Image (tube, grey):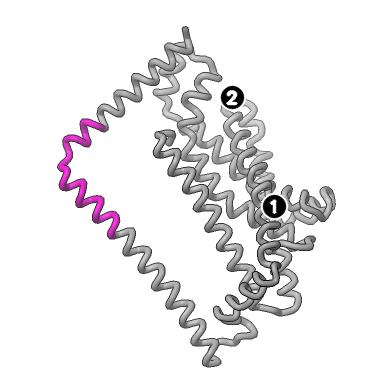
Amino acid sequence: MTVSLAESVQNIHLRLIKRRVAVGGQSQNPQRKVRVRASSRQRSTGIIVLQVIILCAFLGGWEIGAWSGFVNTFLFSSPSDVVSILISQFRRGDLMINIQVTTYETLMGYLIGAIGGSILGLLLWFSKFVADLASPFIAALGSIPVLAVAPMLIIWFGTGFKSKVVVAAFSCIVVALVNAYQGTEKVDKDQLELFRSFRATKMQIFRKLIIPASTPWLMVSLKLNVGFALIGAIVGEFISANAGVGHMIVVAGASFEIGEVLAGVVLVMIMVLVFNLVIGFFEHLLKRRHLM
């Protein structure tokens, strides 16, 4: 009876909010809404065009400087050289192998660190005492640079795939944990009291209120941790690896092949962009299903 009553109260509350939003939307001028949307689209298009122009100007200036001798190609290479290196590695098959290795390490570390850390952060809501007790230890753990512990983790877990996953997970677990717990702390106190007034259990409050209300914080954390997980995997490959984008960058740097180093950097940026697009797609789905 308690479950159904708590759910009924939440449903009524959501219906009232939707009704107010609907009434407010009907009271607005439809023509004004069309103008606002058109203006927003124009602004977004303008920003994208400006970004493309800036990027093209930068790459064009860099290429012209390298071609004219104004830019030292030994120190800075050139865009055309970077592209030719990527094409050459793709034809040899090395490019896809490096991308696959780093992507797999990043994804596994991300699932363990970002997803696992988010779950731990949410679970801390059940005990304020445990959260306060663990707070200084979490802060201390988060202050440790991944580069400082990566050699130790590789000694513990070996030089293979497992150590890179552990380093990637270590890079993002604290950020995920802290963000998730902060999301639980920002839940509307009035809604919390409403659930408690109808004697909802902690698990019911957690499932029906805490998790949905913390979703925006979780999405921010998931976006941030894409880069952290990739950095962890790259750092692990810097120290010990036989393949991967990080291994490619280290080998190229040791032989002073700046073009190949920049090619690796370009791959890292593209991978982060793709991962963020995937996370953004899932965020869009959650918003369409009114889960955020």
Question: Image height check: is 127 above or below 241?
Answer: above
Judged left or right of residue 264, residue 24 is left
Q: How many marks?
A: 2
Going by the numbered disc 1, the residue's amino acid type is Glu
Judged left or right of residue 15, residue 258 is right
The Cα atoms of the two marked residues, 1 and 2, are separated by 32 Å
Other residues around mark 2 within 10 Å, as few (<14) / some (14–19) / many (≥20):
some
The residue shown at (61%, 53%) is 228
Question: Image height check: is 195 above or below 269?
Answer: above
In the orientation shown, which residue stands out farthest toward the front?
91
Question: Where is residue 175 drawn, in percent x and y?
Answer: 59, 45
Magenta-colored stretch includes residue 28: yes
Question: Where is residue 249 drawn, in percent x and y?
Answer: 69, 69
Question: Where is residue 59 drawn, in percent x and y?
Answer: 48, 77
- Residue 58: mark in rendering: none
Quarter holding the C terminus?
top left
Question: Image height check: is 193 above or below 56?
Answer: above
The residue shown at (42%, 11%) is 5
Q: Disc 1 marks which residue?
A: 105
Magenta-colored stretch includes residue 279: no
Pick whichever, 153 or 16, lies toward us: 16
Q: Which mark sits nearer the N-terminus, 1 or 2?
A: 1
Judged left or right of residue 60, residue 163 is right
Give the extent of the magenta segment: 22-42
Q: Disc 2 marks which residue?
A: 126
Pick whichever, 121 or 102, lies toward us: 102
Q: Which of labels 1 and 2 is toward the front?
A: 1
Question: Where is residue 274 drawn, in percent x and y?
Answer: 54, 56
The residue shown at (55%, 20%) is 203
Pick whichever, 174 or 73, lies toward us: 73
Where disc 1 sits, the SS reads helix
Pick whichever, 180 or 286, lies toward us: 286
